[in-house]
Image (cartoon, rainbow, N blue to C red):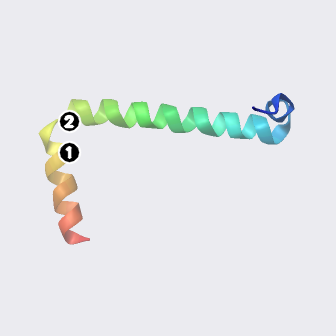
Amino acid sequence: MFDRSFFSSKVGHAALVSVIAMVAFTVFAQMQADVSGANMLVSASITGELA
């Protein structure tokens, strides 16, 4: 199903690092949203209305 040699190439390594970075950013952003609570939702709705 997958070409395993792709992951051993430079492009494969870059893709893997990119996916790991996206997952880490998503987890970090979710943790920040949990900490800020309702204030984040209020600021997001205000920003949405201004845009």
Q: How many callouts does the rendering have?
A: 2
Q: Is residue 48 above or below residue 14?
A: below
Circle 2: element type: helix
> Where does the N terminus fall, quadrant-wise?
top right
Q: Which residue is mark 2?
A: 36
For the point 57% across and 36% down, which residue is it?
21
The answer to the question of whether label 2 and label 1 lie on touching residues, with beta carbons closer than 8 A, is yes
From the top left corner, tell me how far across and down residue 15 is, in percent.
Answer: 70, 40
The amino acid on which the numbered mark 1 sits, given as a three-letter code, is Met
Identify the image quadrant of residue 30.
Answer: top left
33 relative to 43 in the view: left or right? right
Please state the horizontal and vertical placement of residue 5, each as a whole percent of the image.
86, 31
Establish if 14 lies above or below 35.
Answer: below
Q: Residue furthest front?
A: 1
Say few, some or many: other residues with alpha carbon within 10 Å of mark 1 (under 14 / 14 to 19 / 20 or more).
Answer: some
Place residue 14 in its image quadrant.
Answer: top right
Q: Position of residue 6 (x, y in %)?
A: 82, 35
Label 1: state its secondary structure.
Answer: helix
Quarter of the image with the C terminus is bottom left
Residue 30 lies, with reference to residue 47, above or below; the image says above
Q: Amino acid at mark 2?
A: Ser
Q: Which mark is residue 30?
A: none
Q: In which quarter of the view is residue 2 placed?
A: top right
- Identify the disc placed on residue 40: 1
How crowded pointer 2 is (Cα within 10 Å; few <14, some 14-19, many 20+) is rated as few
Q: Position of residue 19 (x, y in %)?
A: 60, 37
